[in-house]
Structures are given as structure tokens and as C-alpha cells.
Image: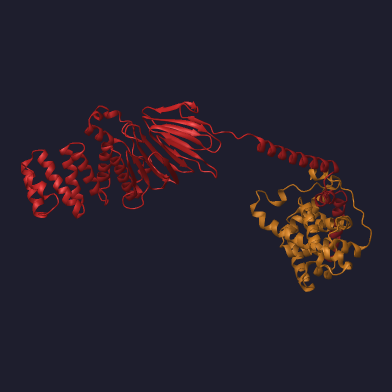
Chain colours: A red, B orange
Amino acid sequence: MTSRYAKLGRAARHELDELVSRSRVSADVQARLFATPHPAARWLWHWVAAASLGLAVAVGVIVWLWPPVPLTFTVAGEGTGLVGAPITSADDTKLLAFSEGTMVWVAPHSTTRVERAQTRGAEVALEGGTLRAQVKHKGDTRWLFHAGPYEVLVTGTKFDLSWDTQTKKLAVAMHEGRVLVQGGLLSVPREVRAGERFMMGGHSQEPLAPPGGATPATEAPAPSSARKFNEEPLSADLAARTTRKGQALAMRTAAAPPELKPEHDKQNVAAALFARADAARLSGNEAQAVALFEEVAERFASDRLAGLASFAAGRLWLVRLGDARAALIDLQRARRLGLGAPLDEDCHARIVEALSALQRMDACKKEQALYLASYPRGPHAGLVSKACR
Amino acid sequence: MTHASRFSSAKPVSFLGGDGELVAGLKAANPAAQQAFFGRYARFVERLLLGVLGPDADLGDVMQDTFMAAFRQITNLRSAEALTEWLRTIAVGVAQNRIRSRTRNRWLLFFAPEQLPDVPLLPARAEATQALRAVYAVLDQMPAHERVVFALRHIEDMTVPEIAAATKVSESTVKRRLQQAERLFDDGKYKHPALADWVAGMEAS
């Protein structure tokens, strides 16, 4: 057995020796293990490295010496924008896209103008209407918005800016970041932060706190001559807008901005809608305010703001818009949804007033009796007792 | 490979001195010593690996791994006189790992190892090379320990004590593995007619 394996081994060794004698494996392994750059290749690599370094230095010098390039912007659908040229939007929102990433949306029936474009920002004048700005923040960003006699200094933020040329009202609604408002009637600059709204009109300064604590800021109230953002065209009911009621009804059909629509956070959406309505009310845009208040009451009936919103809508219908029928619907709903004691008294009194205006005397006297029974010494008891005649 | 050949000067670096100086140079990571070491022992290692593994397409990789391991482990070498045995131990260990990994990965292959192309053999000795391939086909079916012991004993003609040192096991373990390997070889050789004829021819001569 051993002899047989010895013979087999000898034969195998002979074969293997033959293989090794003609093998190039050792040479290849040596080349792999001890590969050194060929002198020519080494020279080539040195040359490439030196050239790359020189190129990098040259590029750096050129960049350093190159004069700064001012921002450019395009107007969506119109091409490159011109500095100083007025940009007026008719029925649709116009988007101004700046080269460094800043976006400015010009609301329908609004006019703006890029007065100056610099490397670190631009100066934009809002001559009338509303715009929304989303400024790309960088370390040395400097953006300035002019609205009438006011200036809004921005470092990096998202906000709505409105300027009513007739009433001379300024409104700033902050979404993100902060701005500095100065000029006009302001003796000192006023900082407006995210979630705040700031209004200046006539001789009044009206900084507004969002209802119910911190809520997302909403759009600034649009001047009467300009429509808000994100509203669908009211093509279905243009004629209706010739009357105040029709205008309010038409506004109700307008969709809320997309960012206010998510249903997963109804409370925030309701608060944001309420804030928008309140801002519209304070800016004198009662029709829009009513539409938004009623939207809160209808869409978010279980929300704590629903009753208050319905009451606010009813009061506007009754006092500002002169529609007692619409007012009655909203006021009655407000009481059903629930109000606090003082407001419930007020609401009840206005229901009596609305019924009286509608000459529905039976209902009026019934509500009058209920009111006086509940609030015999109420602040409106005198007026209520004289109604229904 | 071609790339390495094109961009390498491949000039042998002269290194004068015996194994003592060579080991000292290796421990100092002297490039000249490493090249000299490779120059002196490359054929020895290649032949040893070929004997254990048989004609293997990855012989170059295993050889490279062996020398890389030797360069790394040179500090463990106590005496320059043991350089050859020490290197053989490393080579056998690397080969054994190679056999194990080849066995582990065999199920991943689309073709059986014997179906894969081998390194080119000598056409003039076709019968013998066919028989040699059959020897390693039988060895491929053995566990790694038994296969290595069989190859070292009968193909490399090493003694049992040398095998024990190279595989780092006792001599009795070597003997036991050798018996097991011979039994497996005898069982397997009849599955390969070329090998059976080759062995019969040798027995008749």
C-alpha cells in the first residue's frame, strides 16, 4: 500500500514540478506584491497633481476676483423679470422666482415691483394688494419690502404682506421667522415674529394675538381690492359679488389655502381659519370674514371656536352687512353650538333684534320673554324690552 | 495583472546576506528584504501550495495571501533557522483555509468545481495530467484536515513529524488523519477511471 502511494506521489510530484517550471504565477504575484510606479507613470502622476493644484488655485483666484452677480428673477409664464418694471396680477396669482431660491407670490389684483436686485437680496415694492414671500435664508441675506411708507426688513422667513392704497392699511402675517417693520406711523421699528400678525391703518396700530394662544399665522387680510392667495376663481358666481351678501356667499366657496386643509389636525386648522376671519374682519373685509367664520362653524362644529365663529358671523350679517335673515341663522346656530355666559346673553339679544328686523313678531316676543327671564338685568335688557313692536 | 506589469519596474532589489540578515530586514519591513525573501521562497511556496491544492485557478491569490501573512507575522519568528518551516506552516494554514472556504462556497456555484476550467496543463502529457486532475478530484471530496495530511505525506513526501509541525497538531493526530484519508482515497479512486488506470500502470511497472 505504502509503495503504491509512494509511486503515485512520485508521479504526481513529477507532474507538479513540470507545472511549476512553466508557471508564471510567481512572477504575477511578485508584480502584485511589489508593484512600484514606473518612472514614466510616476512623472505623469506628478504632472497631473501639479496641474490639478494649479487649476484649483486659478479657479479660486477667479472666483475671488469675479464681481458679485446680482440676483435675477423670473415671472412665471412671462420669462425673465425686469428690475423696476411693475408686475400686476389680474385674476391669478403671479409667482416671482429669484435665482437664489426666494419666491414671491403676488395675489390677484395686486401690483408689485422689484426695485433693486443685489447679490444678497432685493428690494421689492408692494404698490397695492397682497403678496406672500418665502425668503431663502442665508447668513447675509438682506431683503427689504416697501409697502407705502412702511418698510419690512427680512432676513429669512415666510410671510404675507398687504397694503391697501385706499385705506392706507398695512398688514403683515408671519408664518415663519421674523421681520422688522419700520417707517410710516411707526416711531420705532416693530418686530413681528412667527405666528403674529401686525396691522397698521389710519392712526391705529393693531398687533393681533392669535385666538386660543399660539396658532399658525394666517394670511394677512387682503385689501378689498385684492383677492387672497389660493382662492379658486369665483367664476360660478361673479354676478353675485355685486352685492355684499353675494360676495360673502361667493367667498364661502373659495377654498382655504392648501396648508390649512389637513384634516388630521382639525383644531389647528379651525384656529387658523378663525384667525384669518378675525384678521379679515379687522381689516374691514366683512364679506370674507363672514365666509371664513361660517366655514369654521360648519366644518368644525365640535371645535370650541365653532360657536364663537357662528356668533361673529351673525353679528357681522346683522350690523355690517344688513342681512337679518342670514344673521338669525348664524346666531341661532351659535347658541346651539354653545357660547360662554356673557356672549350667550349678547347672542340672545341679537336674535331678538334680528327677529324684530324680520317682522317675525311672534317668534320675536317668544325670544324676548325668554331673554328677559334669563337676563332681567342684562346689559341688553333695555333694548330687548323695546323690540318686537 | 496586466496593469501591474505595465506599471512596475519589477527590478529585483539586491539584498546581500543570509537568512539571519533577511529575517532582520523583514522585521524592519525593509522592501529590499521583502523582495529578496519572495525571490528566495516564491518557488518553494508555489510548489507547496500546488501540491496541497492541486491545479487551482486561484493559486496566485493564495500565494499572495501567504506572503502577505508572512510579512505580517514575521515578528513571531524567533529563529532565522526555522524560516523555511515557519513559512511552510503559514502556507499550509492559508491553503487549508482556502480549501475550507472553497468547500463552504461550493453550494453557491452553478457548476461543480471539476467542471470549472483549470489552469492550462501540459498537452504532451495529457494522460498524466488527466490522472493528476483525477487525484485532486478525489481529494476534493475529503475533509480539509484529511486532504492536507494526505497531500503533504504522499505528494509532498513530508514525514509525519514535519506534517505535525506544519499543521500544528500532534503526530498521532496526523497518523489518524492519514489513515482516514487513505481509506477515503481508496474508496474514491474507482470513481475516476483515469486515476484507476494510472495507479494500475504504476503497480504493474
In the rendered structure, the answer to whether residue A159 lies left or right of residue A21 reads left
Quadrant location, the N terminus of chain B: top right
Q: Quadrant of residue A289?
A: top left
With respect to residue A146, does B109 lie above or below? below
Q: Quadrant of residue A352?
A: top left
Q: Could you say which is closer to the camera, residue B175 or residue B79?
A: B79
Q: Residue at x 64, y 54 (%)?
A: B107
Q: Residue at x 24, y 35 (%)?
A: A249
Please state the horizontal and vertical placement of residue A310, each as a whole percent of the image. Answer: 22, 45
Q: Residue at x 48, y 43 (%)?
A: A156
Residue B153 visible in this rendered orientation of the protein: no
Q: Could you say which is closer to the camera, residue A308 or residue B88?
A: A308
Query: Of all residues shown, which one is farthest toward the front?
Result: A187
Please state the horizontal and vertical placement of residue B169, each as a whole percent of the image. Answer: 77, 71
Residue B132 visible in this rendered orientation of the protein: yes
Q: Could you say which is closer to the camera, residue A9 or residue B21?
A: B21
Quadrant location, the C terminus of chain B: bottom right
- Total marks in image: 0
In the rendered structure, the answer to whether residue B90 lies left or right of residue A293 reads right
Please state the horizontal and vertical placement of residue B67, each as a whole percent of the image. Answer: 81, 58
Please state the horizontal and vertical placement of residue A381, each as a whole percent of the image. Answer: 11, 50
Q: Could you say which is closer to the camera, residue A17 or residue A348?
A: A348
In the rendered structure, the answer to whether residue A329 lies left or right of residue A227 reads left
